[in-house]
Image (cartoon, rainbow, N blue to C red):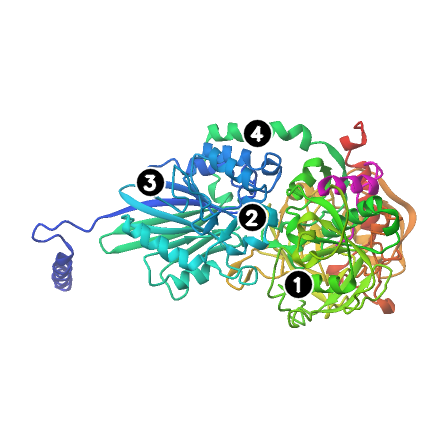
Amino acid sequence: MKRSYCKRIAALLLAAAVLFALPALPVSGEPAEESKSVVIFHTNDMHGALAGSGSVIGADLAAALKQRDDAILVDGGDATQGVALASQSQGESVIEIMNAAGYDAMALGNHEFDYGLSQLQKLREMADFPLLSANTVYNGGLLCADENGNGANVLIEKNGIKVGIFALTTADTVSATKPENLVGVEFADEIETAKQQVEELSAAGADVIVALVHMGVLSDSVATTSRALAQAMKDTELDAIIDGHSHTVVNEVVEGTNITLAQTGTGSANIGRMEITLTDTGVSIEEQLLSAADLSDVTPDPAVTAVIDRLNGSLSETLGEVIGENAVSLWGGSVNGKIAEARSGETNLGDLICDSMIAEAKDILPADKQALPVVAIENGGGFRTTVQNGVMTRGSFINCLPFANAVMTKEITPAVLYAALESFVSSVTAQDPETGFLTAGYSGSFPQIGGMRFVYDPNAKEGEKLTELRLADDTLLDRADTDTRLILVSNDYVIGNALFADCPFVAEGRGLTETVMGYVDTLTENGEKPLSLPMTQGRIKTVNHDPSRTYTAHIALTGDTPPASVTVIVDGTALVTGSVTDGLLELTLPDGPHAIRLTLDQAEAYVNNYSGNGIVDEYNGLTLGWPELAYSAAEYEDHTDTELRGAVEATAEKDGYTGDLWCKKCGIKVASGEVIPALGNAGDTSSGDTSSDDTSSDQASSDPTSSGANPQSGGGKSPLTGSAGMTLCWAALCLSAVCAAYCTVSDSKKRER
């Protein structure tokens, strides 16, 4: 009886379910609500990175994604300037590849102006797709308007959906390229222009309206951000904003609006997939940011691959010329693909560039100026990539310095120098006093310097941040001094800044790229010695700089499953052991930036408590992620000698280790019964300045016994020593040098110069 009763209950429930479902079915002959979709794939800030690699999404992969009837492919600007593929053809190779990939539209970025207006016009004529900017005005009309389009917007119909796309370029472009590139060009207000464009596209019958903008989300670098644009447009028919310029990864519905905002970062590290669905009741949007790993099952378009290979092949001979070896990476551009380190702090690549300009200035100054002190400034946005440890080629520096700048000099005073530096650091507006983390402010104008050093307070008011400015010889400069004469050497972009407009021009040198490569040739003795520069030389410090401070850094280990503890090489000179949890390595390190690798021949990762690289994986709504190193159990174990490592760890805190040291990987004896000094601290080399006349690569050593180092006082543990599991050994300095000499047989040793 119970089972029969249960069956009756079940039947009643089923009947009720059917009854309640009936209103959802078509009645009186009315059709069900229909939906249709369109997919917009989007890129931004590619900076010439259109050739695919392990972490870079090539244009051939983007083309493969677009091979569907409902797809549109667009770019948010800054595509034509950057690595050698772009810079060596002044953007023409980029446009050729984008044509092959089937791009439908592109917004003008500030760097599209870098080759001048005539070259920009040529690129527009080459493109099979419209380059757009609704707020860029030239001699009274829109710069991008011609017989093929209005230069402001485009209406594209896919799958029965009319998608209206208009473009905007940040008005702050006036300070983001050379002034001579913008003669006759003006930028209208972004928000007012956007409102006009939405009305125009709505009247033209657009079902969906998308703003393709090059504005960015960082309020300390532009006056009007893309988020501010969205909030101003919340009561309009704007549905989405595809953004660029700030090199950030963004996927959100802007607070207080229904507008989707997306940006993919930089360097083709991601591609956006925006699926827009149109129903009788409205528009819905789903945005995904896809990495190269997410697209591992997608086959690149072979026709586009062929175009990329042909254009890259034509550059290979020039770019492949070896100019030397680099013991430690030179850091610039977006480090770890996330943070532009040179836009908020000192880097060793910035130091190198400035020192090379000082050497050039001393060669070109007239006799009556030779005795004057020379100071150098390179804007942090002026060098775009990192020169990784290992073999350095001509292409390494052409990719790094893509702007074809010239070296120029002017005569200035301390008062002018103070004013300029105050302006250039003004974007850095906040710092955590305990950790050193610069929590607000990145700018391409942040200065890398040579021939001087300064201390500043990020939390101070604009114009009052510098607390101390000294020349390399320790001469203290007075911000009110308008009499003392100095020579400023910089690139032509910085020299053209209005701050130096009234300063007399002195001399012009070679191109910046050739200047830097020539200086590297000198430091490496024509490529016979490896280049080894410290991470920083104490040229730029904040007021709360503390060399005794330590911090915990994180690195994601990919590849094989790592053990619970892993030992890494830090700054090419020291060994640090850290713990691993769920593939995430934790290391205790001293204040400041550090380069990390697992084996001698591995490309380094970068951590820095000042920038947050390796310290936080998300900040202020931005996803930063962790630096990554590929862990290979076979390679790591092959280069780890347990007995050697154990012997050194057991004695590192004593006077030193006496005995034979061997490298298991190459079988070379590193030392025969020699004493390896106990660990010191090279975390602060404030007195170092490679711009002096007798500079050599030997001066760049971070050995704590060298004159430029500042070992920790008191003879106790270094901040790098920590617990027994975190012991370091300066024997790795010897190990690195000898292994680099014997393990790596470089063609550079044999080449004809």
**Residue nearest the observer in this picture, 728 or 324:** 324
Residue 282 at x, y = what percent?
26, 55
| Type of amino acid at the residue the image marks with label 4 | Leu
From the image, tell me which residue sits under label 3. Answer: 70
> Pointer 4 and pointer 3: residues touching (CB < 8 Å)?
no
Going from N to C along the chain, the mark reached first, 4 or 2, is 2
* Marks 3/1: CA–CA distance: 48 Å
Task: Characterize the local packing of mark 1: few (<14), some (14-19) or many (20 or more) Cα atoms within 10 angstroms.
Answer: some
Task: Characterize the local packing of mark 2: few (<14), some (14-19) or many (20 or more) Cα atoms within 10 angstroms.
Answer: some
> Pointer 4 and pointer 2: residues touching (CB < 8 Å)?
no
> Pointer 2 and pointer 3: residues touching (CB < 8 Å)?
no
Secondary structure at numbered mark 2: helix
Which of pointers 4 and 2 indicates the residue nearer the eye?
2
Which of pointers 3 and 1 indicates the residue nearer the eye?
1
Figure label count: 4
> Residue 729: within the magenta?
no
Residue 538 at x, y = what percent?
78, 60
| Residue 233 location, quadrant | bottom left
Residue segment shown in magenta = 511-535
From the image, tell me which residue sits under label 2. Answer: 182
From the image, tell me which residue sits under label 4. Answer: 311
| Residue 390 location, quadrant | top right
User: Which numbered marker is on residue 423?
Assistant: 1
Q: Residue at x 64, y 72 (%)?
A: 461
| Type of amino acid at the residue the image marks with label 2 | Leu
| Type of amino acid at the residue the image marks with label 3 | Asp
Which of pointers 1 and 2 indicates the residue nearer the eye?
2
> Residue 528: within the magenta?
yes
* Marks 1/2: CA–CA distance: 22 Å
Task: Characterize the local packing of mark 4: few (<14), some (14-19) or many (20 or more) Cα atoms within 10 angstroms.
Answer: some
